[in-house]
Each structure stands twice: as C-alpha cells, then as structure tokens.
Amino acid sequence: MDTVELLQDLVRMPSINPPGDGEGQVAERLRDELVAGGLSAEMVTSPAGRPSLIARVPGPDDRPPLVLLSHTDVVPVEPDRWRHDPFGGERLDGEVWGRGTLDMKGIAVMHAAGALALAAGEREPTREVIVVAVADEEAGGDEGAGWLVRAHPERVGFRDGRPAPEVLGEGGFGLSGILPRAIMPIVTGEKAPLRFRARATGTSGHGSMPPDDQAIRRMGRFVESVSGPGRARIHPVVRAQFAVLAEAAEGRQARLFRLLAGPAGDLAVHAVAHRLRDRAGVIGHLLADTITPTEVHAGYKNNVVPGLAEASFDARLLPDSDADDVLGSVRRLGRRQGIEVEETARAGGPTSGRGALFRLLEEVSRKLTEAPLPTASLTPGVTDLRFFRARGATAYGWAPLVLGPELLATFHGTDERIPVSGFLAACEAMREVVVRAAS
Ligand SMILES: [Zn+2]
C-alpha cells in the first residue's frame, strides 16, 4: 500500500459534515485497502443511514482488544481562502494538501498502515486489533462513535468476560517551535461538556413606561454572575504536564512551569492562571472549569419590554469536577435571582491511566524527528474517545507527528496540509506501536 497515494485519494472524497455525504466512499476505500491486506471488514450503518467501517485482525480474547479509532468526515471549507484546492489532494513541495490531511484522514491511514503491518507480520497477534473509521465525529458523533458504542458495543471491542478495549484516537499532535524543545502530548482525558439553559421572566410593558422588574436585565445580571472561569486549580495530569514543559523550556519560563509542577503550584496558579489563559494556548484552558454563555434570546420589538429572556450556556469541566456540584451552585444562584435553570446535555468520561501501552507510546514518541518530550495531557475540546472512556475503555489521543504553530493553525482552518516526510515517519511509528502492542 502506498500510504501517500491512499491519503491523496481520501482527501479527494469530500466528506463535509454536515451532511456527511462522502463518508461512505472514504470508509469503502479504507475497507478495500484493509481487505486486500487480509483483514475482515464490515460496514455498519446507523439508523439515519451513516456508514462506519469496522475491520479486524483476529487475536486471543484474554487481552483487551486494541481499537484504532478515526473518523471519515471533515469540517467545511471556505474555498476562496485556500491557496490550493481543499479537495485536490495535491502533493506540492513535500506536502499533501487538503481538508482532512490532519483531521483526520491522515491518521486513519496511519492506523491502516499499523493494522496491515500486523496482519502481514510473521508473529501471531496476541490480541485482537480493530480498525474503526466512523461517520459524524465533527457534528457530535451521534451517528458514528456514539451510536456504535451504545448500539453495538461488542463490535467495537466491548464484550462481557473480556477486558475493556484500549483505544488510540485523535487529540494530540506534537508541537515544536514554541519552546526550545518539542513536546508530544499523549491525551489521557478531556474536559467534559455540561450544557444548560436559563429562563428569566419579568413584567412586560411599553418602552416608554418601563416596569421595575425586567426579564432582560434580570438575565443580564445572571449571565454576568455565573459566567467565566471557576477557581483555578491544577489537575494531576496538568501538573505532570507542567513538569515536562519545564524540561522543554528555558530560563524564566522553565522556572514558572517548575513552580506550577511543584508543591507551591496550587497557590501560584491563582496568580498566573489569567496570564496562562491569555498566552499559553491550550494548557491555559485546563486550569479551571469554565461557564460560557453562548446564546441569548429575548425581545421582539424595539419599544416593547419583553416578559421573557432565555440564555444557553456551554460549561466545560475538568475530568475530576462533579457536574452535579457545578449545576447545583448554578441553580442556587439562579433561585436567588428568580431564574430557572434546566440541564440540556452532559458528557464526559474518566481520565485514562498510564499502563504498558502508554509507556510504549512514550518510547516511540521519543524516537520521532526533533526527539519530542512525551507528556500525558488533557484537551479542552471533545473527541469520539469520550464515548469509549465513558464505557470503561483506556483511550489515548496520539498522532505521532510534530508540527509547528503554522501547520497546527490549519486544523479546522484554511490551507490544511501535512508534510510527507513527517507523515511517512508517523505511519512507521504507528506500525511499530501496533505490532509491538499486539504481537
Ligand atoms: Zn477530528
């Protein structure tokens, strides 16, 4: 299999979600490649008609299956802002261009390379390896990973009497060009979304004779009082990450990271959380739960005081925060201000521990060009791995490719592309991981 050509082919199959047309084409192309290499494969289709691919290298049942999880859909593009065709799959100056090269058709190809290497190898697999390429990640996963884990858990590695699967998925590219040394995150957990809606009522009336008790003003006070980052604190995974960042940094920066990793970190973080949120990128958003108003609705005419105002909130909680506690204090605050609060959604799962597979990922990460320092890490956003973690799987976000800030910014943006040399090395790293983890 030529991995670069396969990636180019997949990019040329636009699978923008919504609506996700083209997901099936991507899944079938991957299926054909895997079946040609000796894997058994099936397409499973959600009730709404969205196809996902499941392919296997069989192996004994006494060890957890290894699941390689990717998604076939991509986010939309603004084609006028791209320098090259986002669905051309062109190879230019040592890079493959196009939507999905990073997120995450490139990683799907790495997974395929890993499974094919295992199937072609001489040693008998010591556990089952399942390649899962799902629909609908970019719109929430209800027709892809979420549905599969709920409706067909046995097909994606969960079976009674057998240890829960270990899963590799998206979440962490290596990062170079910010600190003197590159780092390679191995994502062990995600912040958990908690969504709620608030409803304020008041006296309606005419703008010329405003009543005292106005729904919009009541809601305004509530929005202000409830929103923002909560108390800053350092989650154990973030603490370990600060220790690695201290190694990767120099001078004042290294001292700050060392301070945050040490026993004085819990106190120090209050003073610096604001600055880190502003300047330190992702990790700055991992220092507190956040509550953010995302929709506000009220009123219908410029001279009418409405009797109702509604707002929706997107809260993101650290993996060890208690959603009931957070919601409880939001509700208490609401009651005092005459606001009704209704939960609309929650998700999340526990952080995965660090066993033998984690140590293998660390070891293989260190061998990549630029010798990045591996570090356990959390992400503020969500991936499909949350469905697996919530059901008891150990899941890591790991993409063995080190990128500079310029390329990382193309993720969900314009001019998304992947360097061919890094991609080939990443395929090789994934082969090593799959073969060593499963034989
Ligand atoms: Zn993705």
Image (tube, helix red, strand yellow):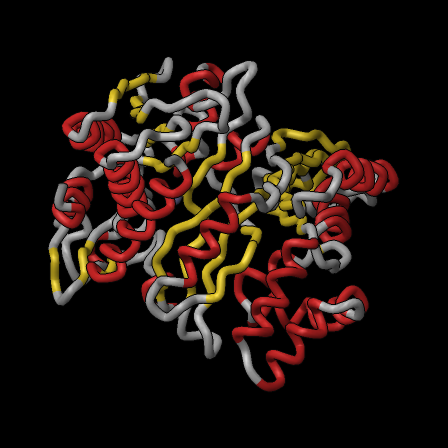
Establish if 166 lies above or below 228: above
- Does residue 203 appear anywhere in the picture? no
**Residue 317 location (% of width, % of height):** 66, 45
Q: Is residue 394 left or right of residue 9?
A: right
Establish if 422 lies above or below 162: below
Q: Residue furthest front?
A: 123
Establish if 291 lies above or below 37: below
**Residue 9 location (% of width, % of height):** 14, 42
Say how many tags the image has.
0
- Displayed-image quarter of ligand 1: top left
Residue at the (17%, 32%) spot, across then down: 33
Q: Is residue 434 left or right of residue 422?
A: right
**Residue 92 location (% of width, % of height):** 12, 62
Question: To which quarter of the image does residue 91 belong?
Answer: bottom left
Residue at the (32%, 59%) spot, across then down: 410
Residue at the (54%, 77%) spot, across then down: 249
Quadrant for the N terminus, please.
top left
Question: To which quarter of the image does residue 371 belong?
Answer: bottom left
